[in-house]
Amino acid sequence: MAADVRSEVSGPRAFLLGLVGFAAFETAVYYLLRWATSGLGERNQFQAENTIVRNWVKTTAFLLGHLTLVIIAVLVLSNLLPRRYRSQIIPWFLLSLLVMFLLLWPLFE
């Protein structure tokens, strides 16, 4: 019973592998969602006929799509990874929530 409570710490190699996987995942998700939302919104933000509604729809679709893909990835990884690496999932998940909002900048440029 005590072995289940004990937390095993993974090393720097696992962290670097997680960092590379995180960067690859975020890049793939960004380009996938950029392609999926390409017909929404206005590219030129300084047009006279530009309305916030089109850009709001694109922003909402991007954020919901990103959140959906991240939650799916967390669920899959929590089932596939060995127990000693599961402690890294939540910090990467929280970082992904921050990155989700930062990716809106290049999406509208």
Image (cartoon, rainbow, N blue to C red):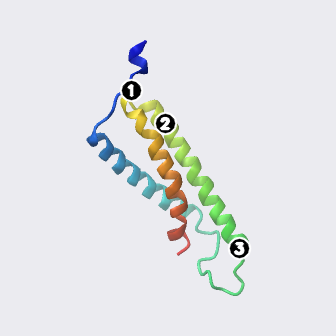
Find disc 3 in the rendering and name its residue. Answer: 52
In percent of width and height, residue 24 lies at: 39, 53
Ranked by sequence position, the earlier of labels 2 and 1 is 1
Front tag of 2 and 3: 3
Find disc 2 in the rendering and name its residue. Answer: 76
Cα separation, mark 3 vs mark 1, equals 48 Å
**SS state under label 3:** helix
Q: Which quadrant holds residue 10?
A: top left
**Residue displayed at 66% across by 86% down:** 47
Cα separation, mark 2 vs mark 1, equals 21 Å
Q: Which residue is farthest top?
A: 1
Ranked by sequence position, the earlier of labels 3 and 1 is 1
**SS state under label 2:** helix
Instruction: Answer above or below: position of 65 versus 104.
Output: above
Ranked by sequence position, the earlier of labels 2 and 3 is 3
Q: Are marks 2 and 1 in contact (CB under 8 Å)?
A: no
Q: Nearer the viewer, residue 1 or 82?
A: 1
Find disc 1 in the rendering and name its residue. Answer: 7
Of the 4 image quadrants, the one containing the N terminus is top left
